[in-house]
Image (cartoon, grey):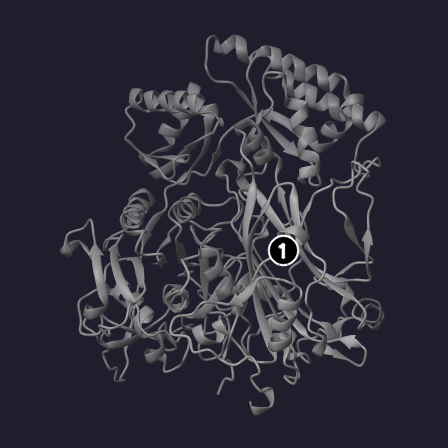
Amino acid sequence: MSNKKLPIKVFAKRDDIDLLQNEGKPPNEKPPTWFLFGDELRHRAGKLSKSLEEVSGYFKDQGDSDLSLLISAELYEKAFSKTHRGDIVNLFSTKSTDTPVLGLDPNNNLIVEIKSQLELDLLQSKLEDYENNTSSISCLEELDKYSPFIIFDKESDYKVKLVDFQDNKKNNVAQELFEETLQTMEFQYIKSNYTDKLVIYCLKNMTEEMLNLLRESRIFSYIYSIEPMPTYDFMIDSVSEEITLSAKSPDPSETYEIVGILDSGIASNKYLDSWIDSTQSPYLEEELDKSHGTAIASIVLYGDELEKKDLVKHKGLKLFDASVIPAKDQNEIDTLQNIKEAIQKNHEDIKIWNLSVSGKKSKIRSNFSDFAVAIDRLQNEYDILICKSSGNEINYNSQIYYDRYLSGGADSVNSLVVGSIAHHNNNISPFSRFGPAPSGIVKPDLVHYGGHAIEDKNSNGVRILSEDGAVTKSIGTSLSTPRVTSLAAGIQQRLEEPFDPLLIKALVIHSASYPDGLNLSIDERINQVGFGIPKNVEDILYNSPSEVTLILRDKIARGGYIDIMDFPMPNCLIKNGVYTGQIIITLVYKPILDHTQGSEYIQSNVEVKFGTFKNKKERDTTNPRIKNPFAREESQNLLVSHIYSKPKRNPAINEFIRKEGINKLYNENSYYSVKKYSIDLSCLTPKKMENHIGEDVNWYLFLNGFYRNHILKKASNDLVNLDQEFCLIITIRDPSQKSNVYEEMTEKLDSKNFWNSNIKLANEVEIPLSYNIQEN
């Protein structure tokens, strides 16, 4: 029986103490070792210059045109950081063009716009003056005339995107030219706005001959990509299961959260009818196969009862039935249009949505998918949270993992993406697709129970309801996802707070851990099962006396940072002259996204550090470079791996590491919108323990924001002030369960003048603070 009865807590920084100003870094006068000099630099500049000579006649051939020459610039592998991007942009910049780099192509090459012969000549002159352009030339491997990324297999429907010129007028000109070309060639096509900035064309029944005609057209060099149009469907096979399930009905005196089910439709039966709030469908009844949507709905509502386990523990949830996919295959354009219509019409009342449909032919490897970009935009625009399945590999083999990359949409940055583990042995299901997602971000975020199968696909399935209400078994990430959806909705139902997708997402991920029996190394599990399997609603929202969970929900404006130099670490954790304890930190932020930047889709970053320091030093603010009156001395960030003993962090002997251990390294260049850390202070090396967690140290919590060069330029041109919303959750616990961490943290927050309160929960009974730990 859990003794978790104390609500988790919310606290805030002290604006007059903890909010500081960035002072900038002193310039690094020593260039990187890979910069070129002498003959190597001259040779590289000559190679780049010769490439430009091959396009020297472009503007004469084009005549009058509103469109420019596009060049592909291949970067040296160590030149991708923000530090070097500014130098590269400066090489291509002119007085009339300060943002010539349009974005990244699918091969991570820069797409550079050259507007005139004058700009082309100026670039040539900069390459000839190579000694004054050392850094930018060192960063470039190749320059070539841009050509589209093409995947062509056979006659089929193909998806076409045009290059984004970062200019509405030029984009309109390119679209008009493309559409005129298609009409002249009598190609059938459909145009769709995935977002207000992402326009997609579907070319119907495209043949190789049609592709060759496009290659010869004027518009070809402004096409970004041509690839097969994904189609979406669902598959659910099941076998009967002889168990009895009691139907439940809503309590008229209760208010229930509504969950949006974006699927194939929900069938009418005695278990679900009274819980369906409303429906929306663009299809006739006979065009639907509701087996899949019914299974999803049954797990949202009856998941715990079907498995006879307290996996989620909610009081019941209403369902919104949005049929977005018919019985037959449907292309991505129609699927997204149906999803958008359902969300646009109902987002004010429905904040949490389940999306368990995945695309065929849509395995994600390098760039973020258009489907992900579209659902990310929906979540930002309508302040909602989508729980998305990672996708199933149909032709799976339990021993082969190389072709199980995420399905399209499962690389969504804003969504909670869910994979599957088997409920009988806690290992990854052999069909569950996994990451990492583009740029190395963690996807899936989580896993839950979706069954296991090798030969008989349903022999180890999870229980669901069929259309007629019979209990059956089936498998799939489609069935693990609604458990997380219902968990998110169950948390929101317990909160007396306005809906906050960052908070819900952070709470669910923060609670996750790796189950006993998981047969994956620390390195493997972050890619295959994300951060693990989450706890249920009650365990997420409550602490025991020997632990405390704090939530910091805030934003960081560009130019500032947060440095809490007197973080209230409980003294009750000091044992034998050093601090002890286990600490889990989860950071979720709302990133600035831009699909035109390819693998650099995530344009902003938040860095967190947590650790100790010896002294707080007073500084001379009369110096114009110094903006902050105090600074830390002899700081040690404890969220780094090299200061911990590998033998002590062995999962075979350390249960905390086995369940919570994460081997994911983050720094200011890690543009991951979800970051999680778990540390056990007893695992520090003896020297680090002596130097950095002695009883006389001070504790700090630090957060800072970073932005890529592209979004900085754009914000400057648009006169926009950048900032970053984030939600940080930190749990500090005594592994011996003997110290009253919760009580002392509450007292310290008050004594150090931090605003704090228990998280506001519905129907909450107040528990006395002096809850006696020895009675549990």
Location of residue 62 with respect to 532 vertically, above or below: above
Q: Residue furthest bottom?
A: 775
Q: Position of residue 34 (x, y in %)?
A: 79, 37
Amino acid type of the residue tagged 1 in the rendering: Arg
Numbered marks: total:
1
Q: Is residue 362 left or right of residue 99?
A: left
Determine the secondary structure under disc 1: loop
Q: Nearer the viewer, residue 279 or 255?
A: 255
The crowd level at tag 1 (other Cα within 10 Å; few <14, some 14-19, many 20+) is some
Quarter where residue 299 is shown: bottom left
Q: Position of residue 415 (x, y in %)?
A: 44, 55
| Horizontal relation, residue 523 to residue 168: left or right | right
For image coordinates 31% across by 52% down, the residue present is 348
Between 238 and 253, the one lying in front of the other is 253
- Residue 359 screen position, x and y as percent: 37, 51
Q: Answer yes or no: is residue 556 visible.
A: yes
In the image, 120 versus 514, the foreground residue is 514
Residue where numbered disc 1 is placed: 14
511, above or below 774, in the image: above
- Give how far across and how far down residue 256 sits, in percent: 30, 67
Image quadrant holding the C terminus, namely bottom right
On the image, which quarter does residue 56 sit in? top right
Is residue 436 visible in the rendered structure shown here?
Answer: no
Between 715 and 769, the residue placed more toward the observer is: 769
For the point 81% across and 70% down, which residue is it? 696
Q: Is residue 74 above or below residue 412?
A: above
